[in-house]
Image (tube, rainbow, N blue to C red):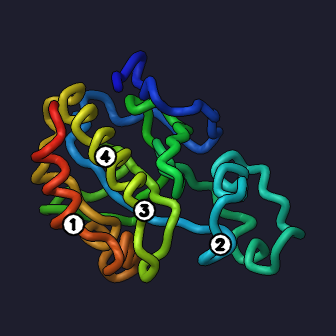
Amino acid sequence: MKVIDHKISEARWLASPNFNERPSGAPINMLVVHNISLPPKQFDNSYIEDFFCNRLDCSAHPYFEEIKDLQVSAHVLIKRSGEMVQFVPFNQRAWHAGVSEFSGETNCNDFSIGVELEGTDDIPYTEQQYYALSQLTLCLCEQYPHLTQERIVGHCNIAPQRKTDPGPSFDWSYFKQLLKKLPS
């Protein structure tokens, strides 16, 4: 796995319009782990991709009416199968964190990479997702030297009053063990 022109070689590319420039000189120094499922707790469909690309058919499910006006994205989505889809180049600012703060720094989108896991707070993630996330993380840490394992956080860590993801179903200990076991 390699980063080429700020895109991950193993990912399917699907351009989102929901991004903009990072502030000049902002180092990429954080990875934020999220979860998403559309509709909630339903997997293996194209709704997340459609949502991040502003083409979600809001008549397809009643929940979609609640999110129809949102414009969000992540850099990468890791599906239940482990497949990766990239929406925004890493050198651009994806719109994933919202109002956020970490160690006194606000606007975490300015300096972070957002990775969405197809899942929920309370349904276990798949082995394939942990493997893909750990490979991706190691690759990103190698490519972007300011990104260290100490700055890999959940959305819940940067927006604790608003967000709970990746939730209790995400096994941080197991994920960190995988980071140590995989060759860098």
Q: Secondary structure at mark 1?
A: helix
Furthest residue to the top?
Answer: 5
Q: Which sits earlier in the primary sequence, circle 4 or circle 2?
A: 2
Residue at mark 3 to residue at mark 2: CA–CA distance: 14 Å
Query: Mark 2 — residue?
Result: 42
Q: Which residue is mark 1?
A: 172
171 with respect to 72 (left or right): left
The foreground one among 132 and 153 is: 132
| Circle 4 residue | 112
Which is nearer the eye, 144 or 71?
144
The residue located at (46%, 29%) in the rendering is 10
The residue at the point 37 percent across, 58 percent down is 127
Label 3 sits on residue = 126
* Mark-to-mark CA distance, 4 and 2: 27 Å
Q: What distance separates the C-alpha of mark 1 from that of mark 2?
A: 23 Å
Helix, strand or loop at disc 4?
strand
Q: x, y percentage for residue 116? A: 46, 56
Who's the residue at 39% across and 50% down the image? 114
Is disc 3 in contact with disc 1, using a CB cutoff of under 8 Å? no
Please provide percent x and percent y for residue 72: 57, 55
Q: Identity of the amino acid at label 3?
A: Thr
- Tell me the quarter of the picture where residue 37 sits: bottom right
- Relative image position of residue 157 (x, y in whole percent): 25, 70
- Relative to 178, is 58 on the left or the right? right
Q: Amino acid at mark 1?
A: Trp
Number of the label disc, if any, that sits on residue 50: none
Q: CA distance from mark 3 to mark 4?
A: 24 Å
- Few, some or many C-alpha atoms within 10 Å of disc 4 (few <14, some 14-19, many ≥20)? many
